[in-house]
Image: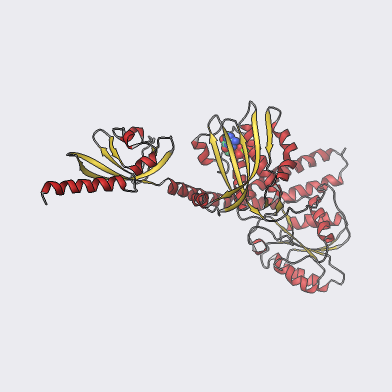
């Protein structure tokens, strides 16, 4: 075979390989920083035709970065439609029609980079969450005491008494602090969720009057609720908090008024979605979207949105806990959320919760203010002395007979020697020597008819190993008010049959 033919064959083979290769490739003129040739895979990825590519300056594709990319890390390119992609590029010197050129083999790593970002974000959230959870846990005990005792003082005072106002102010401050602590807890993991089967349309409708008041007259609230919406399993109080935080953010983004839409619908998140989002299982979800046509967010804000204490609002206007709380609640409910935002156009936050196949639960309503009284006998086990005194005091004032101890073995002894009926065991979930659950299990052996009420701040112990409390277990979350305590005690005492033990 003549040498010329061989050369042509080689060129043709190169041409074929270049054009048909599934990996995007360019031939670049390094001196002029121009693209000389592009293959069809590159045309597909960038949305330019091969003709458009020929002679195109590299500056038209490169996204300038302030500090420039670290060596080896992906560069950012702009496609024909303006989409930004992350690209890794391997360059080889070649001879192109007698001129030195570079063959650039391109790899689109946008998806991988997004997953890496999500992982880093998840790790950061996890460590901040642990810190927040620890602090909140201790605060809960203190706040239970502050609010509880001020409530007891208030109950004992006439409204005309000069100390009444003072006690009222302490109670109010305690309640505000408790609300803040609750937000921190919602963000941290693991925690207790009191999940029920919920119809999100009902939650939205139930909250709408309050939301309208919250957003004021200049903002128009529209509800677009899908009639055959699926059910979800979630804590209704927490979901209300999610909605409130999103609605308040939307309102803040529209200081001159605008339109706020809350929309519910059924969606399916497929493999391709779950592939792009960490820890999202493909399947049926119920979506709630809160959208506004306000100021929107730039990229820098969007990148830090879910960080606790990240706020762009001035001092005294935002604490930056809203979206981190939303994030925590949605993640703990097995869901996910997406934020779409365009500066000066608006923002849409989509919350996805896993759809379940059950009718909504009928909820028993308890009046929160009413102090429910009774005369039954209660055995109280709580190692935090101040909390124990408060609970005892509250129950004694409400008419109950109370035996209390900080020590589970003392509780066993009391239960063994007491002659009468013990109607209710109230126990902390986490105690140094033995868990509340173990104690309840043992005492049940001696006293079959005894009901059990667990109390806790936040915990990851066996009673709630999935983070979601079993329905059969009566549970009171700290901090609680005396009214909530007495209401819960009545509820448990009057519940039908014997109280089932956790784990049965
Ligand atoms: N709908 C929205 N439109 C525009 N920006 C938003 C929107 N929602 C959130 N943001 C931005 O995200 C930041 C963080 O929101 P987040 O709710 O966590 O805190 P915050 O609203 O500043 O304070 P807090 O909710 O604790 O009162 C806000 O400061 C704001 O810059
Ligand atoms: Mg907010």
Q: Position of residue 335 (x, y in %)?
A: 60, 50
Q: Residue at x 49, y 52 (%)?
A: 275
Specify the quarter for ligand 2: top right
Q: Position of residue 196 (x, y in %)?
A: 71, 54
Q: Position of residue 155 (x, y in %)?
A: 85, 46
In the image, 368 versus 6, the foreground residue is 6
Q: Is residue 76 rendered to the left or right of residue 15?
A: right
For the C terminus, give its image quadrant: bottom right
Q: Residue at x 17, y 39 (%)?
A: 98
Q: Position of residue 188 (x, y in %)?
A: 60, 51
Among the 4 quarters of the image, the one containing residue 56? top left
In the image, 170 versus 502, the foreground residue is 502
**Residue furthest left in the image:** 2
Q: Is residue 2 rendered to the left or right of residue 360?
A: left
Among the 4 quarters of the image, the one containing residue 401? bottom right
Is residue 155 placed above or below 444 in the rendered structure? above
Among the 4 quarters of the image, the one containing residue 467? bottom right
Examine the rendering and report whether any part of residue 201 can be seen.
yes
Examine the rendering and report whether any part of residue 316 can be seen.
no
In the image, 431 versus 202, the foreground residue is 202
Q: Residue at x 69, y 47 (%)?
A: 228
């Amino acid at each position: 075979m003549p040498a010329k033919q061989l050369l042509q064959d080689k060129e043709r083979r190169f041409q074929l390989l270049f054009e048909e290769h599934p990996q995007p490739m360019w031939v670049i003129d390094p001196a002029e920083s121009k693209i000389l040739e592009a293959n069809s895979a590159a045309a597909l990825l960038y949305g330019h035709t091969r003709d458009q590519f020929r002679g195109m300056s590299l500056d038209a594709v490169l996204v300038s970065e302030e500090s420039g990319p670290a060596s080896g890390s992906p560069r950012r390119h702009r496609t024909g439609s303006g989409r930004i992609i992350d690209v890794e590029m391997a360059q080889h010197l070649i001879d192109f029609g007698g001129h030195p050129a570079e063959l650039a083999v391109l790899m689109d790593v946008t998806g991988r980079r997004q997953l890496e970002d999500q992982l880093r974000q998840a790790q950061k959230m996890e460590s901040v969450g642990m810190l927040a959870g620890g602090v909140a846990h201790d605060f809960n005990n203190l706040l239970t005491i502050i609010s509880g005792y001020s409530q007891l003082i208030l109950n004992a005072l006439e409204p005309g008494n000069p100390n009444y106002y003072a006690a009222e102010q302490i109670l109010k401050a305690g309640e505000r602090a408790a609300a803040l602590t609750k937000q921190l807890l919602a963000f941290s993991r693991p925690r207790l969720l009191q999940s029920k089967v919920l119809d999100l349309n009902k939650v939205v409708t139930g909250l709408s009057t309050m939301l309208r008041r919250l957003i004021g007259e200049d903002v128009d609230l529209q509800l677009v609720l899908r009639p055959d919406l699926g059910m979800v399993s979630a804590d209704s109080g927490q979901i209300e908090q999610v909605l409130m935080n999103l609605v308040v953010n939307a309102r803040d983004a529209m200081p001159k008024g605008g339109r706020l839409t809350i929309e519910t619908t059924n969606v399916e998140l497929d493999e391709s979605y779950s592939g792009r989002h960490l820890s999202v299982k493909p399947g049926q979800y119920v979506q709630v979207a809160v959208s506004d046509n306000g100021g929107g967010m730039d990229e820098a804000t969007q990148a830090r949105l879910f960080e606790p204490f990240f706020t762009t609002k001035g001092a005294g206007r935002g604490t930056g806990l809203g979206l981190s709380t939303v994030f925590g609640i949605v993640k703990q409910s097995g869901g996910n959320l997406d934020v779409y935002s365009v500066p000066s156009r608006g923002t849409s936050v989509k919350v996805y919760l896993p759809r379940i196949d059950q009718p909504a639960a009928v909820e028993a309503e308890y009046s929160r203010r009413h102090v429910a009284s009774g005369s039954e006998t209660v055995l109280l086990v709580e190692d935090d002395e101040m909390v124990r005194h408060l609970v005892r005091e509250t129950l004694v004032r409400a008419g109950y007979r109370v035996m209390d101890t900080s020590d589970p073995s003392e509780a066993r002894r009391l239960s063994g020697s007491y002659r009468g009926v013990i109607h209710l065991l109230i126990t902390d979930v986490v105690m140094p020597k033995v868990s509340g659950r173990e104690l309840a299990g043992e005492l049940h052996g001696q006293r079959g008819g005894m009901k059990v009420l667990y109390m806790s701040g936040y915990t990851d112990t066996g009673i709630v190993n999935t983070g979601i409390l079993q329905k059969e277990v009566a549970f009171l979350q700290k901090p609680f008010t005396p009214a909530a305590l007495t209401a819960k005690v009545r509820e448990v005492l009057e519940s039908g049959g014997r109280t089932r033990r956790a784990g049965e």
